[in-house]
Amino acid sequence: MAASATEKTRFYGRRKGRPLSQNMQRLLDEVLPDNLLPEDMDESWLSKRRAQQGKDSELILEIGFGGGEHLAGLAAMHRDNLFIGAEPFINGVVSLLRHIEAQKLKNICIWPDDVRLILDKLPAHSLSAVYVMFPDPWPKARHAGRRILNQGMLDRLADLLQPKGQLRMASDHPVAKSWLLAEAMRHPDFEWRARSAADWRERPSGWPQTRYMRKGVIEGRLPSWFEFQRR
Ligand SMILES: C[S@@+](CC[C@H](N)C(=O)[O-])C[C@H]1O[C@@H](n2cnc3c(N)ncnc32)[C@H](O)[C@@H]1O
């Protein structure tokens, strides 16, 4: 029997973690509203919001930003660009809000839910880059359908990325590394531009480091970095 649309977009991760402290609730109540991607976001809202960053601003999406350290790092490095970050884990959203407040960031729009719910609202060829950093590996073969990156997702990202736009992915899990690489390599719209082992073994400059990455390296989990280009 074919899976229903709801089953196909079912989210299997966690939405809540530790109970929210008073300060976490304050961040949600006071900081989130100014940095929220509205549910009724459309092309005209997005073009006005981009114009606030500057006429040459680029639009960049991070899928599953976790605690938001990488996304905040990018946004701090490129204050003229606009970043959309999607993350259904509310404690992760709060953590990003902490970075936004501390670094006075004004260029992140947060979608505190499943990224698949906004992909159809984004204009075609509007994104200059998409980041999928350390996605949940779902290592068991019977859970492969839960992995965020698959041919359907790549079809959508190919529509949304500009020609020569970048799909940037990283993982330190052996199953996820092979999966990300194999899926993107077999998609006709993406090209892997690595020329030597250093291109996937070394963190490319401009990809902010996070505590999770540093901890992984100390514990012997070496990340791989994959940069694909939209043809
Ligand atoms: C292993 S964590 C990695 C977090 C972060 N990118 C990092 O590098 O630390 C994967 C994240 O992807 C998020 N995620 C999973 N499915 C998602 C979806 N459909 N839309 C948005 N985020 C998703 C999870 O909630 C989780 O926070």
Image (spheres, rainbow, N blue to C red):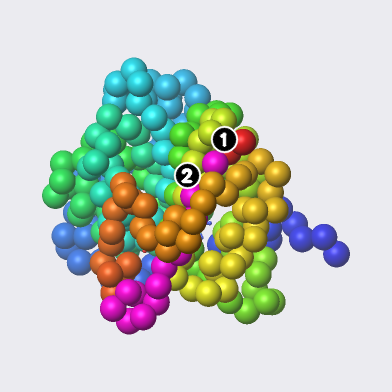
Q: Is residue 94 visible?
A: no
Q: What span is in magenta?
A: 216-229
Residue 116 to residue 221: above or below: above
**Most foreground residue, 194 or 33:** 194
Image mark for residue 59: none
Q: Is residue 170 shown left or right of residue 10?
A: left
In the displayed structure, would residue 104 be above or below residue 10?
above
For the image, the number of numbered tags is 2
- Does residue 119 appear left or right of residue 44 in this picture? right
Q: Position of residue 116 (x, y in %)?
A: 56, 49
Which of the 4 image quarters holds residue 83?
A: top left
Real-space CA distance between mark 2 and mark 1, rounded to the nearest whole angstrom: 9 Å
**Circle 1 residue:** 160
Ligand number 1: quarter of image: bottom left
Q: Does the stretch in magenta take in 219?
A: yes
- Secondary element under disc 2, as helix, strand or loop, is strand
Is residue 56 visible to us here?
Answer: yes
Query: Is-magenta flag for residue 44?
Result: no
Residue 47 image offset from top left, x and y in percent: 42, 22
Residue at x-position 28% and y-position 70%: 214
- The residue sitting at the top extreme is 55
User: 23 or 48: nearer the eye?
Assistant: 48
Q: Which residue is identified by label 2?
A: 130
Dot 2 and dot 1 residues touching (CB under 8 Å): yes
> Would the CB of label 1 be found within 8 Å of ligand 1?
no
